[in-house]
Image (tube, helix red, strand yellow):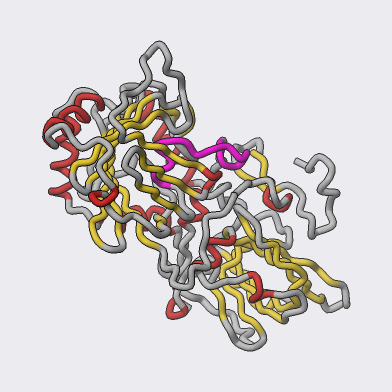
Amino acid sequence: MIRALRLTVFTAAAFAFAPAAEAHHSGTMFDDTKEVTVEGVVKEFQYTNPHSWLLVDVTNADGTVTTWGFEAEGPTTLMARRVRRGDFTPGTKVTITGHPMKDGRPAAAWTKGVRADGTAFYPRGGAPEAD
Amino acid sequence: MTGITRFAVLACVAIASSSVIAQEQAQQSQATWQRMYEMGLANRTASDLYQTLKQAAGGGQAAPPFSQLPDWSGLWTAGGGGSLFGRSPGGTRPKLTPAAAVEVQQGEALAAKGVAYDENLSQCGPPGFPRWLVIPFLREFIVRPEQTWLSSETVNNVRRVYTDGRSHPSPEEAFPLYYGDSIGFWDGQKLVIHTNQLMARSMGRNQPEQSEQMETVEIWEKVDAGTIAADVWIYDPTLYLEPWYVQRRYTQVPNADASLRMNYWHCGENPNNEVFKTPEGDTQYTDFTFTGDGDPSQEPSR
């Protein structure tokens, strides 16, 4: 598991916010200068329009569980980017990355997801070579 | 917070919307853009431009047989975002009325600070036209002899372009519409469209409001197997001192397994997507169902 802090130069395509830029709402509640990655277990994949939400239960050091929500585009955009509903069934162990909310709530704009089997997903587009 | 394995400050902020638009515009040369722009300048009104194009097409074709119509089947999309007040490929900006120029400047300042709210889409309203040109998600173009449907997944909208030879409703019968009234004719494989009866409303986040005087002319053409281009001239004397010209391109979405479909789309189907406008004019999510901070069935905390 990668734990090292990494500075990454992203191309515009890697973080193509274009759909979000004109989608149902502005993406200004997310801090796109920051990145957060959590390890957890999928609680629910809300495959909905105009935005989907991947809910991930993350176990804290004290044993409590925080549910994080990772926001992505709607089903057809996700399907076009090879992120299917069945890819994240409840109980799936995942490592999820996104741009966190500015207000500190446990939610983020979902940019990357990696399952325990190593399969990587990029719900906002962005080729693996950008990472 | 334990469980967070990385929290990295990115080396650069890469907001792609403007880049996407720039890339799309770059597909058209400045010389071509200039020629199309001057077609708008040469015609005082959108109706004049439409008639000029119709005359050049020998009157155009009304309701041509299916065999003469282009194949626009499949699913299409475009990079969303952008502004109809942006720059041409060569950097030309539209000549705006003083009031519109101030609004555009103020909007750009807000956007630079990351402040934006969507008066239309965030409340499940339609994007309307011409904003329709720049919205993302899937599109489907249904071509029939007597009319063409230009549909978009966003809020389930359909622009109907009547190509059966009819005229617009008379001024006495006309009333403002989100997508206006569109009539057109075929010039070979090109669909030429005139739209009026548009509603006065916001053209997008941090952008001015269009007026009921706005009218547009479009030329749609499949320029290669995977690309449909739309040349668009926008006339609105409350915004533009001269008609503005933009080209939008829509690319075919790979769908070899036919798994992608246009689906009904409503922004209220998931309570986690509810947003509100902050006192500062920004966008913020209401209480989430998954944080346990509030009862989503109750009025969201703001």
Residue A55 image-quadrant placement: bottom right
Whether residue B128 is in magenta: the answer is yes
The answer to whether residue B68 of the structure is visible from this angle is yes
In the displayed structure, B161 sits above or below A61; it is: above
Work out which quarter of the rendered image holds the C terminus of chain B and state it: top right
Whether residue B132 is in magenta: the answer is yes
Residue B34 horizontal/vertical position (percent): 15, 43
Work out which quarter of the rendered image holds the N terminus of chain B and state it: bottom right
The answer to whether residue B245 of the structure is visible from this angle is no
Residue B102 horizontal/vertical position (percent): 39, 29
- Residue at 61%, 75% (x, y): give it: A113
Q: Nearer the viewer, residue A100 or B41?
A: B41
In the displayed structure, A97 sits above or below A103; it is: below
Residue B252 horizontal/vertical position (percent): 37, 61
Task: Say left or right for B118 vs B3.
Answer: left
Residue B216 image-quadrant placement: top left
- Residue at 37%, 28% (x, y): give it: B100
In the displayed structure, A47 sits above or below B65; it is: below
Q: Nearer the viewer, residue B119 or B189?
A: B189
Question: Farthest residue toward the top?
Answer: B172
Task: Say left or right for B302 vs A126.
Answer: right
Residue B24 horizontal/vertical position (percent): 30, 55
- Residue at 57%, 59% (x, y): give it: A73
Region rendered in magenta: B120-134
Q: Nearer the viewer, residue B212 or B302?
A: B212
